[in-house]
């Protein structure tokens, strides 16, 4: 399964539960340097837990997570996490939100990051003044200002309207292709997963049910016949035979 | 003056219309003899009493004594309440150890302790400062504790994910997140501070605004009594305005 390239992130037989409820049950996954991986699955399938484990915000029951050969047993300093709800500090101006955690003399870096997401002119605004899409762009700048080797995206576009969503997808793809950080995107929008990822992974009942490479050329064309075929195929796996139509009829092709 | 400025000026003026009319009406009816001076002296007479007391220096002394008690009691009680709220909000062990006891003590009306406090400390400064500190402690504690407990967990997690730890996490995320609740406690406790002081000074004191009023009662000096009441109202309003100003300043991101 593994093509050329060094395994960058290696998950081995990981198990994680809360109280008596088990969330991840013996999951194995290898991700290469610079790969864009999308993780899809129903709510509660453990996809967000997986991201939090990779970020080092939570810890495994058994198994191991290796990043560049080193086990994660505290906060993963190579990774930055972007949340669905942005989580900007409302009492800090946009600029201060982006430069949070940076040494004092790195204002310029923060400004550059804001420029990359097209919000340099909003540096001195309060986050409350921004639209939902702008907030997520600031959150993206805040994540990227640290030049992380791994960007973890926890449904960051889930709350945005359709147009802003497409814009953000383009922005994420563009920044990723410039910087070549490893990206792991958790989403419930299969179309988004196919549009962005090199590989779409479907998690069900705590383990991987499907690992689908997306061989389409970039930038991805949604009108490409291969595109909708792949979306349909992944959806088939999620819904299972017989349950399909209800989901396939849904224009946004979301899976809850 | 442009239109915006004009609207602002009018909006600042409107709240003062009723107090002004009341004062004018009071003066008018008092001068007409409709309100006997024995019941309520005219505003003008109260002013005269104030000027007289200012000349002898008595008024300044009483005000300074009362302000000193209010401020020292507030600082002592407020600091203890704030620190306890901080520790109990941040540390599980501290919360388990102290919170229940503090909540039990909180249910005792602190003014009920006055007779006991007089026996402990006499009627000089210590008893007044103790009472004010005790009254201020609980509202500050409850709001600080609650404020820290209800800081958005998502923001704390975000801070940790971005490498903030210890004091830096507290300074950047937890304290600003709790600040609006802390300021509510601060403002509320300023009210408690004046109320406690009034009661304590009226019951037992040999200086201060409350003493001035009780002393005036012995000599039927209605104007001085009313002056004392107006002074309390003035300082109550003043401290509330300061608290509001701080809120506006520190919570400016909230608009």
Image (tube, grey):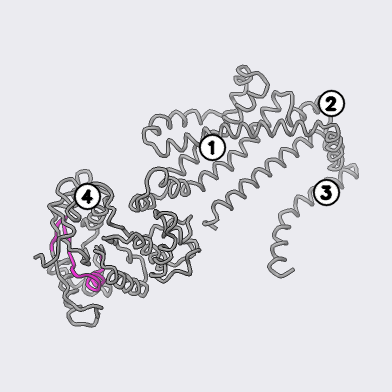
In this view, which residue lies farthest toward the right? B32
Which stretch is magenta? Answer: A187-209
Q: Which mark is residue A72?
A: 4
Quadrant of the rendered structure where residue B89 is?
top left
Q: Secondary structure at mark 3?
A: helix
Quadrant of the rendered structure where residue A157 is?
bottom left
Q: CA distance from mark 4 to mark 3?
A: 77 Å
In this view, which residue lies farthest toward the top? B119
Q: Which mark is residue B219?
A: 2
Residue of label 3 = B25
Are there few (<14), some (14-19), or many (20+) residues within 10 Å of tag 4? some
Q: Secondary structure at mark 4?
A: loop
Residue of label 1 = B139
Chain identifier of the residue bearing label 3 in the image: B
Q: CA distance from mark 2 to mark 4?
A: 81 Å
Q: CA distance from mark 3 to mark 2?
A: 27 Å
Q: Are marks 2 and 4 on the same chain?
A: no
Task: Please indicate whether residue A235 sits to the left or right of residue B58 in the image.
Answer: left
Quadrant of the rendered structure where residue B30 is?
top right
Marked residue nearer the N-terminal end (3 or 1): 3
């Amino acid at each position: 399964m593994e093509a050329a390239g060094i395994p960058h992130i290696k998950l081995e037989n990981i198990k994680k539960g809360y109280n008596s409820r088990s969330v991840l049950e013996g999951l194995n996954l290898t991700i290469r340097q610079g790969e864009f991986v999308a993780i899809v699955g129903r709510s509660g399938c453990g996809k967000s837990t997986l991201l939090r484990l990779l970020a080092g915000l939570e810890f495994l029951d058994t198994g191991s997570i290796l990043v560049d050969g080193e086990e994660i047993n505290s906060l993963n300093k190579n990774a930055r996490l972007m949340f669905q709800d942005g989580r900007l500090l409302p009492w800090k101006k946009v600029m201060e939100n982006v430069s949070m955690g940076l040494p004092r003399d790195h204002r310029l870096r923060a400004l550059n990051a804001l420029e990359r997401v097209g919000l340099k002119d909003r540096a001195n605004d309060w986050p409350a003044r921004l639209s939902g899409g702008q907030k997520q762009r600031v959150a993206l700048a805040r994540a990227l200002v640290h030049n992380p080797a791994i960007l973890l995206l926890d449904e960051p576009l889930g709350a945005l309207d359709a147009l802003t969503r497409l814009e953000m997808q383009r922005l994420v793809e563009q920044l990723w292709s410039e910087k070549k950080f490893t990206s792991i995107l958790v989403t419930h929008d299969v179309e988004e997963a196919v549009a962005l990822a090199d590989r779409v992974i479907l998690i069900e009942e705590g383990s991987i049910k499907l690992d689908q490479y997306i061989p389409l050329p970039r930038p991805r064309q949604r009108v490409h016949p291969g595109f909708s075929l792949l979306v349909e195929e992944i959806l088939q796996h999620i819904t299972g035979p017989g349950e399909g139509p209800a989901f396939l009829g849904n224009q946004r092709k979301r899976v809850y | 003056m442009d239109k915006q400025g004009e609207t602002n000026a009018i909006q600042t003026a409107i709240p003062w219309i009723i107090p002004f009319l009341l004062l004018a009406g009071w003066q008018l009816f008092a001068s007409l003899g409709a309100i006997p001076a024995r019941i309520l002296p005219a505003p003008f007479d109260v002013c005269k009493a104030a000027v007289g007391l200012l000349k002898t220096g008595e008024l300044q002394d009483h005000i300074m004594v009362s302000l000193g008690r209010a401020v020292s009691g507030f600082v002592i009680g407020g600091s203890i309440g704030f620190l306890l709220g901080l520790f109990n909000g941040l540390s599980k062990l501290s919360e388990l150890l102290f919170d229940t006891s503090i909540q039990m003590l909180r249910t005792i009306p602190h003014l009920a302790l006055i007779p006991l406090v007089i026996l402990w400390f006499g009627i000089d400064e210590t008893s007044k400062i103790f009472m004010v500190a005790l009254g201020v402690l609980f509202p500050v504690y409850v709001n600080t504790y609650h404020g820290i407990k209800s800081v958005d967990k998502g923001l704390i997690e975000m801070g940790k994910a971005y490498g903030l730890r210890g004091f830096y996490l507290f300074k950047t995320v937890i304290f600003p997140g709790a600040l609006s609740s802390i300021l509510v406690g601060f403002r509320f406790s300023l009210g408690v501070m004046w109320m406690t002081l009034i009661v304590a000074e009226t019951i037992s004191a040999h200086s201060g605004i409350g003493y001035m009023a009780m002393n005036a009662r012995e000599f039927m000096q209605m104007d001085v009594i009313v002056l004392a009441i107006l002074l309390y109202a003035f300082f109550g309003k003043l401290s509330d305005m300061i608290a509001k100003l701080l809120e506006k300043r520190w919570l400016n991101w909230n608009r």
